[in-house]
Image (cartoon, rainbow, N blue to C red):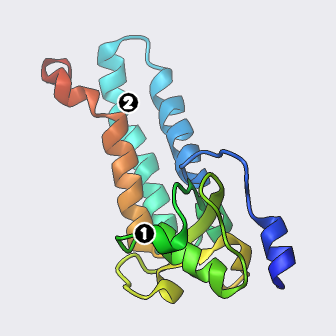
């Protein structure tokens, strides 16, 4: 893909910082829990909701989740040369730069995490604009994201522990 086509495909709108499949997971979890008529029934539905999350993680581990559904969108606040810490955003910005595209502060970048522990910008993420049918994803990373989603959803139970005894 040439630099002009790549630049045109960059998402320059203010988007969500979430991942499509994690939003879908949240929706499914809430659908299971929202049918409860009272607190006791809600608590009885928690295992069913956790089973939904486990199924998502199994799908990730088996490589059955399409990578395009795992794309993060991040709005950047600085240019590639201003980053002091190596992170997913910097890795993506370096990939885009290597393909002739300079993303500016205020723009959005999109990427899939391919190897969260990598210190190499070429392998840590894949800019969404550079993805193809063979783009892998880091299943362990995305399973941790599922866990974080579930923890966030049930965080209130730590605030009100008497509610789930």
Q: Position of residue 7 (x, y in %)?
A: 79, 70
* Residue located 62% across and 51% down the image: 106
Task: Give the number of the disc on residue 83.
Answer: 1
Closer to the camera in the image, 37 or 98? 98
Q: Residues within 10 Å of mark 2 (few under 14, many from 20)?
A: some
State which tag comes first along the sequence, 1 or 2: 2
Horizontal side of residue 140 vs 122, given as left or right: left
Residue 137 to residue 33: above or below? below
Instruction: List x then y, in percent, for residue 12.
Output: 73, 54
**Which of 14 and 82 lies nearest the eye of the viewer?**
82
Residue 2 at least partly seen: yes
Does 19 sit left or right of 134 as displayed? left
Which residue corresponds to the image point at 49% horizontal and 74% vertical from the top-left?
81
Q: Which residue is mark 2?
A: 45
For image coordinates 67% across by 73% down, the residue present is: 102
Q: Residue furthest top?
A: 38
Task: Determine crowd level at label 1: few under 14, some 14-19, many 20+ residues with C-alpha closer than 10 A.
Answer: few
The residue tagged with tag 1: helix, strand or loop?
loop
Q: Position of residue 15 (x, y in %)?
A: 65, 46
Quadrant of the image occupied by residue 129: bottom right
Image: 162 above or below 91: above
**Front in this rendered view, residue 5 or 49:** 5
Q: Which mark is nearer the camera, 1 or 2?
A: 1
Q: Where is residue 50, by image quadrant? A: top left
Residue at horizontal 40%, vertical 70%? 87
- Disc sitting over residue 31 in the figure: none
Is there any visible trace of residue 135 in the rendered image?
Answer: no
Query: Could you say whether the residue bearing mark 2 is in a helix, strand or loop?
Result: helix
């Amino acid at each position: 893909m040439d630099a002009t086509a790549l630049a045109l495909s960059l998402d320059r709108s203010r988007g969500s910082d979430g991942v499509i499949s994690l939003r879908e997971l949240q929706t499914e979890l809430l659908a299971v829990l929202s049918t409860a008529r009272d607190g006791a029934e809600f608590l009885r539905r928690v295992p069913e909701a956790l089973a939904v999350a486990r199924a998502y993680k199994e799908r990730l581990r088996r490589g059955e989740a399409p990578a395009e559904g795992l794309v993060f969108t991040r709005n950047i606040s600085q240019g590639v040369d201003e980053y002091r810490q190596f992170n997913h955003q910097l890795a993506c910005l370096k990939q885009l730069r290597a393909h002739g595209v300079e993303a500016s502060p205020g723009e959005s970048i999109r990427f899939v995490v391919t190897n969260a522990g990598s210190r190499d910008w070429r392998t840590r993420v894949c800019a969404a604009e550079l993805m193809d049918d063979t783009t892998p994803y880091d299943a362990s990373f995305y399973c941790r994201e599922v866990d974080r989603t579930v923890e966030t959803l049930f965080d209130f139970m730590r605030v009100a522990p008497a509610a789930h005894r």
